[in-house]
Amino acid sequence: MSRKIALITGATSGIGWSTALSLAQIGYNIIATGRRLERLQELEKELRLEGADCIKLCFDIRDKEDVKEALATLPENWKAIDVLVNNAGNAHGLDPIHQGSLEDWDAMMDINVKGLLYVSKEIMPWMIARQQGTIVNIGSIAGKEVYPNGNVYCASKHAVDAITNGMRMDLNPFGIRVIGVHPGLVETEFSLVRFKGDSERAKTVYKGYQPLSPEDIAETIAFAVSRPPHVVLADIIMLPTAQASATVIKKNL
Ligand code: NDP
Ligand code: 8X3
């Protein structure tokens, strides 16, 4: 049987990278996207070891023309995308709202919300034409709850949650499954980006308890997309056992 096709945004690290590998292991060829070409090249090597073909698309998801042009370069047979994982995103800063930076706010809304829409806008018609497909949007516990200083990041992830639910309704006539995955604390480059390269501060986020790993999320995504076609795991919240909510975390420090 021929392999299916998954497109994963933000595949150069963390959850996206692990999801690419997990989906390759269950029989997908992968379209991997991100800004860091050298990381995409490394990932491609690992995917080939799993027997998967890979197309690398290097673009900044904030740029709608670049997104459109990059996706238009896909060969026709690669446009038959079975699974789209809208994963690219990050937090920028953790400041009280009156001290927040406009650049950080722009980055979070442009990447986490508008970037997800730009990519989806190109791919949804291809799924609609085939009357099939699965879209996985990576939200966050921050899309279900607001926490102090999380303000605009939480808003961006609440928007992802709303878009996910809206997609499920609007794409319902076409047999397209839409899955929201909302992780709690996962140890990736997320905090390094949030704290602008301050690795000491980033490490403290994951001290004193066992956070989720990107592989934990990837395995769950692989499970969700491989349910029978009549089943949709619509809304998945995944936390480390030590985390009870966005703010309640049992740490042994
Ligand atoms: P990482 O920082 O490890 O990965 C982020 C990915 O997003 C990278 O591949 C990065 O690629 C890509 N990305 C960021 N900005 C852009 C851009 N402008 N254009 C294109 N790609 C971009 O973090 P995670 O793996 O943790 O994050 C993945 C998703 O999971 C995000 O949506 C995040 O909000 C969400 N999440 C993370 C949690 C956590 O605790 N880690 C918890 C809940 C949700 P590149 O830099 O190469 O462009
Ligand atoms: C990432 C998890 O709690 O830092 O979305 O917002 S959190």
Image: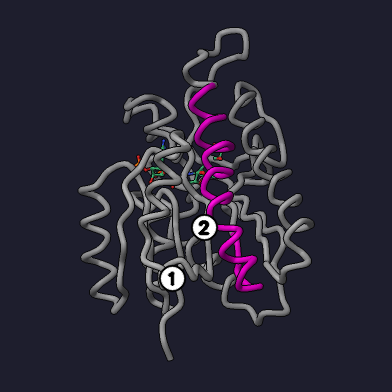
State the residue in front, 21 or 126. Answer: 126
In the image, is residue 92 above or below residue 221?
above
Q: Earlier in the sequence, mark 2 or mark 1?
A: 1
Toward the top, the furthest residue is 98
Q: Which mark is residue 146?
A: none
> Does the CB distance between marks 2 and 1 fall below 8 Å?
yes
Name the kind of residue labelled 1 in the image.
Answer: Leu
Q: Residues within 10 Å of mark 2 (few under 14, many from 20)?
A: many
State the residue in front, 90 or 115. Answer: 115
Under circle 1, the secondary element is: helix
Instruction: Choose top left, top right, bottom left or bottom right for residue 226.
Output: bottom right
Residue 243 seen anywhere in this rendered image of the structure:
yes
Q: Is 175 colored magenta in this rendering?
A: no
Toward the bottom, the furthest residue is 1
In this figure, which colouring scheme has been used for the structure? one colour
In the image, is residue 128 above or below residue 89?
below
Determine the quadrant in which ligand 1 lies: top left
Q: Provide residue 63's location: percent of width, then percent of height.
A: 44, 34
Under circle 2, the secondary element is: strand
Residue designated by label 2: 85
State the residue in front, 181 or 201. Answer: 181
In the image, is residue 6 above or below residue 201?
below
Q: Is residue 184 left or right of residue 65?
A: right
Cα–Cα gap, marks 2 and 1: 11 Å
Name the kind of residue labelled 2 in the image.
Answer: Val
Q: Is 133 colored magenta in this rendering?
A: yes
Residue designated by label 1: 23
Q: Provide residue 204's location: percent of width, then percent of height.
A: 42, 33
Q: Residues within 10 Å of mark 1 (few under 14, many from 20)?
A: many
Identified at 50% across, 32% down, the residue is 91
Residue interval drawn in magenta: 106-135
